[in-house]
Amino acid sequence: MNIKMICLGAMALSMVGGAAFAKTSALDDPAKMQPFYTDSTMKTMVSNDDFVKAWKAMTPDDQTAMMKACEDEAKDANAANSHPEFCSSVKANGGSK
């Protein structure tokens, strides 16, 4: 009985702990992402000129966080990556300051 309780407790901790380790990124912050999209559903990107303006309006720390999040998303390439168009624009315009 003790072994079962220990195993059950360990399994419960691992399930709860797994959620704590879930990655959040700058790409998941609607307030940071909204200036780059034309609508509230964030499906249609703004023009390249507007993208550059929005990019330049961000703080250097936010720009770095966005670039890192896109790099991480590219490294973990899978179907869950939901920002390919945005990240390609970041890569193309990321150096624009």
Image (cartoon, rainbow, N blue to C red):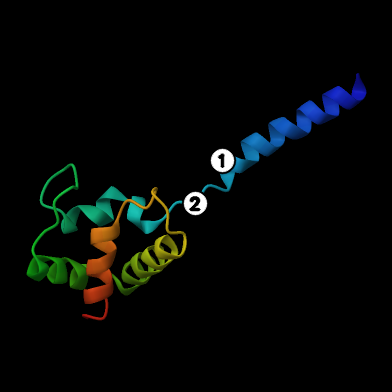
Name the residue: 15% across, 71% down: 52
Residue 3 lies left or right of residue 35; in this view the side is: right
Name the residue: 36% across, 72% down: 64
Q: Residues within 10 Å of mark 1 (few under 14, many from 20)?
A: few
Compare residues 63 and 4 and report the one nearer the observer: 4
Dot 1 amino acid type = Ala
Compare residues 36 and 87 and report the one nearer the observer: 87
SS assignment at label 1: helix
User: Which circle marks residue 19 in the picture?
Assistant: 1
Compare residues 56 and 86 and report the one nearer the observer: 86
* Image quadrant occupied by the N terminus: top right
Q: Residues within 10 Å of mark 2 (few under 14, many from 20)?
A: few
Image x and y of residue 75, in percent: 46, 65
Name the residue: 84% across, 24% down: 5
Within the image, what quadrant is residue 77 found in?
Answer: bottom left
* Image quadrant occupied by the C terminus: bottom left
The residue indicated by pointer 2 is 23
Q: CA distance from mark 1 to mark 2?
A: 9 Å
SS assignment at label 2: loop
Image x and y of residue 31, in percent: 26, 51
Residue 80 lies left or right of residue 12; in this view the side is: left
